Amino acid sequence: MTGFSFAKTIERGLGSLAALSLFLMMVITFVDVTARNLFNAPIMGSTEMVEVLLAIMVFMAFPLVSWQEENICVDLLDNYFPSKWVGIRQIVINLICSCSLILVAATNWKLAGRSMEYEEVTEILELPLGFVTYLIAITGFIGGALTLFNAGYYTKKLFSRTDSSSDVSIKSKEA
């Protein structure tokens, strides 16, 4: 039960941060447009703030989409795939996705370090870009771990189904 509550905590945290960044984007845009139209005084750097918040929102929601398997998929071969192999297919797909996410996250981690070393900042507000890139890397690692968790779930489901079907056949022979 502890693993489930930990998973729910991660899910709520990522979802809350994504929602908060979306809300802040909305507030900044509203205030900027209102100030621009009524007072002819837009918020300096509002575009940069919205860009950074957009990156935060997308990459906070990204692990959730991967974990819940709600990403876009093409099911061209699903009708031709034997139903008894669906579990194996899901394990392989989740393992490939997990490895890919972790590889991309590791690359982003290196890029974030380099960005911090070169002191790269945004043009107007001079916000350090390395922190955003570190966030992208961290959420990539989280997404990779959650997708690996999905592969483990399908593996457990595949083997428990095999065990339960053999138990059924043994129980029917005994009766």
Image: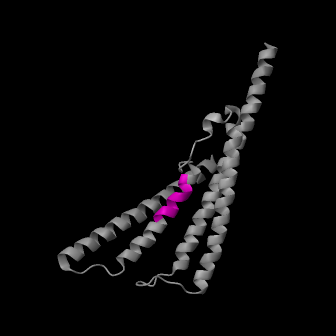
Residue nearest the observer in this picture, 117 or 83: 83
Looking at the image, which residue is at 66% across and 62% down? 102
* Rendering coords of residue 39 (x, y %): 19, 79
Q: Is residue 152 visible in this depiction of the protein?
A: no
Horizontal side of residue 108 vs 26, given as left or right: right
Q: Is residue 125 visible in this depiction of the protein?
A: yes
Horizontal side of residue 23 vs 131, given as left or right: left
Magenta stretch: includes residue 168: no
Horizontal side of residue 11 vs 144, given as left or right: left
* Rendering coords of residue 74 (x, y %): 56, 46
Answer above or below: position of 15 versus 167: below
Quarter residue 108 falls in: bottom right
In the image, the segment drawn in magenta is: 57-65
Looking at the image, which residue is at 66% across and 36% down? 81
Figure coloring: one colour
| Magenta: main secondary structure | helix
Residue nearest the observer in this picture, 123 or 77: 77
Q: Quadrant of the C terminus?
A: top right
Looking at the image, which residue is at 66% across and 50% down? 94
Answer above or below: position of 58 versus 169: below
Magenta stretch: includes residue 61: yes
